Every structure is written in C-alpha cells, then in structure tokens.
Image (spheres, helix red, strand yellow):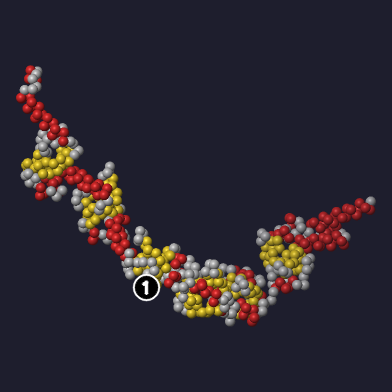
Amino acid sequence: MDVYKDLNNTKNKEFEKLLSNQLSKSKNIVEGKIIEGKITKITDKFVLLFVDGLKSEPIVDINELKTLGLEKKINIGEKIQVFLEKIEDKNGNIIVSAQKAQKIKGWDILVKAYESKEPIIGKITSKCKGGVIVEHVDSGSLLFCPGSQISDKPIKDISHLMNEPQKFALIKLDKIRGNACVSRKQIISEIKKVDKAKIVEKFKVGDKIKNAVVKGYSSFGCFFDVNSELDVLVHLQEISYTRVNHPEEIFNIGDKHDLLVIGVDMEKLQVSCSIKQLSPDPFEHISNYELNKVYKVKVVKLMDYGAFCELEPGLSTLLHASEITWNKKNPSVKKYFKVGDEIDCVITEIDKDKRRVSISYRLTKENPYDSLLKKHSLNAEIKGLITNINEYAIYLKLNDFDIEGFLHCNDLSYTNNGEEELKKFKKGDELSVKLLEVKKDQQKVRVGLKQMQEDPFDWFKDKKIKDILTVQIISSNNKGLIVKPEGSKLEFLIKKSQIAINTADARPSRFVGGERIDVAISELDFPKRKVVLSIKLLEELQNKEALKMGSNPLSGRQLPFSSLSEKLDEKEKKKNTKKE
C-alpha cells in the first residue's frame, strides 16, 4: 500500500500515461468490425498480421486470400482488411476473416448503389431455379436475377451472356437477410426508353406516315410498325368512318397503310395515328345513295360471317352471310367471293346515327321460292336428288331450283316405320315427291314421298263409328292385339281394355294369332288419321240388341259373354214378379 501513497511521483505518472494509451487503443478495437492489419510474417499456410491495439498477432489462411484474389498482397508490409470476429477465444487466439471483411465491404457498396439508384457491374456465373446467379464484380457478392428480368424479350439461350461484365439494376435489397435481387431488363428498357424518346421527338401532329405495316391488333385498335423503329396505335374509332367491331374486319397482318399523326405523348412515348382522317367523311354525301337500288361494291375483306365491301373509298359496308344466297342459312363466304371482286348489291339500310350501311347480294337475284311457286303448285309432283340424310329426315336438291326440300321420315310410307324406311335410301338417289308446303319467309320447303301413293286410310271413307268389321289377328302382346281389317293394308292395336267387358275375359293370351273375329269401330278421326277398334264395344252392342229382342235366358248362356246371361236372368226375374 505504501507504493500508491504518493501518486504524484514521477514513476507513478509514467505508469498512468502508458496505461491510458493502451486503454485508448483497445477501445477502438471492437468485435464485429473491419480492422486493418500489416503483414509481418508469411508461412506456407498462414499470414501473420500486426494490428495496433491487439495483444497478439491475428492469423489468416493463405488459401482464403488467394480465393479472394488477393495473391498480390501477400507480401511483408502489405496492409489487409479483415473482419474481427473475436478478440480472444477460449484458447486465447484472435479470430479474424478476410472473406467476411470483403463481403461486408461489398454489401456497403450495394447499399449505397441501391439508395442512390445507380447500376452495378456484374456477370452471370450460373443458372439456378427461377433465374441466374450474378456476381458483383467490385465485391464478389453473389446476387439473384429472376428469369423474367434477364431481358425485355424471351430468351431461350443465354450462353452469350455468361461471364460477361454488364450493367444490372438493384431492384430489391434485404438488409436483414443479406439478399439482393437485380435486373438486366430494367437497364435495357431504360436504354431503349432514351432511344425511343429521340425517335418520338421526330413526329409532330399533322405529319403523314407512309407505308406503315400492320403488326397486330386488339379489341381497342390496330398496331402499325413505322420504319422498323416505332410501333404506333390506330384506335378503333380512327380506323374508318363506318362502324368497326374489330380491326381484323378491315386489316390483315402485313398490310401497308398511310397514317396521319394526331397525337404525340412524350411522357408515355406514344404516337397516336388515324386512317380515316386522311380522307373526307363519306357520310357527308350519303344522301347520294338510295334504298332498294342496285350499286356496284368492291369486296375488301372476307370473314366467316360475311364480306366487307366498299361503296366508295372510305365508305365500308358489311354484306352479311345471310344476305348472300336465298337457300342456305350459313353459306361459306369464300366459295362465293374473293378479295377484289366487284359485285352488284342492293342497299337495304342507311342509318346515319350509327353510320351504318347494310347491303344484300341475294336481292339482285330472283327469289327461287317465288320461282318454285310460279312453276309448281302445291301437291304437284317434283323430282330431286338426295344431298343429305340424318336420323329423322332426307334433304333433296329440287331439280331446276337451287333449293333443298325437307322430307321427314313420317312422310316416307303410310304403312311402314319411318326410321326403318330411311335406311333404304342413300345420297345421290333421285326421288319423285309431292310439294307439300312452301314457306318463303322462312326459306323452307316440305315434300312427301308417301303422298305419291294411294292413301290406305281412304279405305275408311265409307265407314262410321259402331260399324262392325272383320279383322284377322296378327299377334298379341301384353298391351293387346295387333289386328288387320280384311281388305285394308293398315294394322291396328286393340288395347287390352277393349278386348272384353268382363275384366277376366280381357286377356290377349286367349288368342294365338290367325283368328278371324268381328270388332266395332269406337273412334274414327279423318283429320288426325286415327281409328280405334274394340271387341268390348261389339259385345255391348250385341248385349243391347239381345235385350231388345227378349232372348231366352238359356240362349244367353251359350254366348261367349257371361255378362249377357247375367243381365237376361235379371230381366226374367222381373217378368215373373209382375205375373205373380
């Protein structure tokens, strides 16, 4: 204790000064920061550094320095920056890292470039899932570039971009995770934007662009390529004075057209153009055209639903497919016209408000349905060739007329099944049929084949309800009896409920087929071609007649109908009661 009694002596003051200097130096040495050391010794595997303020010399692996490209600095006296991880570990060693120092230093460069929005120099070193890995040239830091940010156009092969120093824009920086995302596309777009601005500056409102090429179209307009350096838009409303639903109605890819510049936007770097303003509005003299008159038009474009034609340059009109021919509802436009044809058409509508003109080609031709009625009356015989057959009808092209007749399977035969009859015909067969119906407004013609034969239903013309017929039983089934009247070609079904009055006797199985029996007509409708035959009705009629004649009760029992004998027994009882 005696040593520290006098703190003002010379030795104590010198010791205090040395201690203060050492403490001030050690305060500048902090873990987790980059420090600078001077190489004092080089071995085969390690480099020893002197760092002022540290109690011992840190050791750095030579291979680490070589990996970082610092081979030239491996010399005595050279200064190297390292990252101080620990001032002293459990063994008393100082832990430093040159690689981490360089990474942190490079990260600071990236942060500065990101905040100032400056591009960095990098090179693509390898591919990875979803993009490529970019190495920052200045720091060696590895960055991620998504596949969508490699170029402004899809690129299948990027081999020409590998390991080539080029500019990248930092678009995302995660300081916590230490991740960075870059974009080459943004650099390319900015360069093109500068170049595009110089191109757009050349155009002024009122300029005329010649031979612009149709590049593509959308629902709102058409895009044109101008001199292979700029794409311009012609809005849907600026294409034509007439109504246009879609640019494809007017243009084909590759067509050339003159354009008029009507707008220049330097902020969006867009040039707007017009086609219709190059010519005067044709609707200003639309009064020169009259309805229901024939005019020559030029076919300019063919579509599935019609043909676009020009009455005069700039005045377009649609010839709808339904107005091409009389006989087909959906004709193929390309089979009738080609682009450049000049055809005669009738103007059917002029709508000044909608700026629309409608025309018809078929009105310049005689209506074949009128011609058909002039030459043939209804029920007349006419010949035709079968052009098509489906599951329920035949279509025939009527001779001398560009019309298809409709022949339903029910009009093939009076006696046979219509669907079975269809199988007997094929395309190309010629048939003689009767003209049954002509609907001019609906463009429909109905014909019949069975009407060419005698109607077997006429056999019932002299018959009436309750008449008795003799029929032959063809067959029986659960529904009843199939019978054919003698002298007739038609077959009829006697339902099970019409076989007998007594339910017990109403059994189709009582008949085996081939029997001749009498039946009565219970229903006869000529307009509906309906006949209903009944054994039950015949039984009722015979019962009624027997009761009128007062038949002997015993005679009734001999009849095949048990109900009749029962009624006669009741009548006999009543007579005996009156006598008593």
Kindly identify the residue that appears in the image at 9 percent across and 45 percent down. 78
On the image, the x and y values in percent for residue 447 come to 63, 74
Q: Secondary structure at mark 1?
A: strand
Q: Nearer the viewer, residue 359 or 494?
A: 359
Tell me the amino acid under the disc marked 1. Asn
On the image, the x and y values in percent for residue 188 come to 28, 59
**Residue, disc 1:** 211
Kindly identify the residue that appears in the image at 28 percent across and 42 percent down. 176
User: In which quadrant will I find the N terminus?
Assistant: top left
**Residue 297 seen:** yes
On the image, the x and y values in percent for residue 556 come to 83, 59
Residue lying farthest to the top in this orientation:
2
Q: Nearer the viewer, residue 543 or 189?
A: 189
Left or right placement of residue 134 versus residue 559 in this view: left
Count of numbered circles in the view: 1
Q: Nearer the viewer, residue 226 or 484?
A: 226
Kindly identify the residue that appears in the image at 54 percent across and 69 percent down. 352
On the image, the x and y values in percent for residue 213 come to 37, 70
Q: Is residue 362 above or below residue 578?
A: below
Q: Is residue 145 above or below residue 549?
A: above
